[in-house]
Amino acid sequence: MAYIFASNWKRFASFLVDSLILSTIITKPLSSLVEINTPKNFTDILNFDFGNLILVTSIISLINFIYWVSLEYKIQQTIGGLIFGIYVKSEKNRLSLPKTILRNITKISTILLIIDVISVFISKKKQRFTEKLTGTITLQND
């Protein structure tokens, strides 16, 4: 059976849709907890509660990570993937939870995600680095 690897534009568009959903439902509401106390000048920085900022940022990252992992593990695609007809598949075995966690671990950091995505452009199977590690691929419907 021949697979059609997901095109870069479909992957990117799917990621944008998922990011918009997460931003609207999770990031914006929770970010407002930090914005209320954002330092306005240098002296405010000395009194700023960085612990609160770290806590809120960590919660946002964790919820976003759970979104990607849970949907890919349960239905092999996110909402963006459903819209653009792309899905995740293990190259050899069934898609396992540990594989799904590892393939999405870079989504907790923008810098890690950028590094991960670079390999899509040089891979024959259009795989991110973490997809190569986990033996997973992203495919598109005919």
Image (cartoon, rainbow, N blue to C red):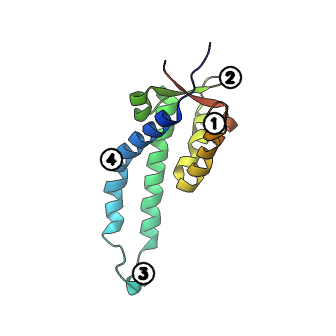
Mark 2 = which residue? 92
Residue 66 drawn at (x, y percent):
48, 42
- What residue type is disc 4 on? Ile
Disc number for residue 66 = none
Whole-angstrom CA distance, mark 2 to mark 4, is 35 Å
- What residue type is disc 3 on? Ile
- What residue type is disc 2 on? Lys
Crowd rating for badge 2 (residues with CA inside 10 Å; few <14, some 14–19, many 20+): few
Q: Point out the tag, 2 or 4, that comes first from the N-terminus.
A: 4
Describe the element under mark 4 as helix, strand or loop: helix
Q: Point out the tag, 2 or 3, that comes first from the N-terminus.
A: 3
From the viewer's perspective, is 63 left or right of 32?
right
From the viewer's perspective, is 98 left or right of 110?
right
Disc number for residue 45 = 3
Residue at (48, 57) in percent of width and height: 58
Disc number for residue 131 = 1
Work out which residue is located at the far bottom of the displayed protein and give it: 43
Label 1 vs label 4, nearer the camera: 1
Describe the element under mark 1 as helix, strand or loop: helix
- What residue type is disc 1 on? Glu
Whole-angstrom CA distance, mark 1 to mark 3, is 41 Å
Whole-angstrom CA distance, mark 2 to mark 1, is 13 Å
Mark 4 = which residue? 25
Q: Are marks 2 and 4 in contact (CB under 8 Å)?
A: no
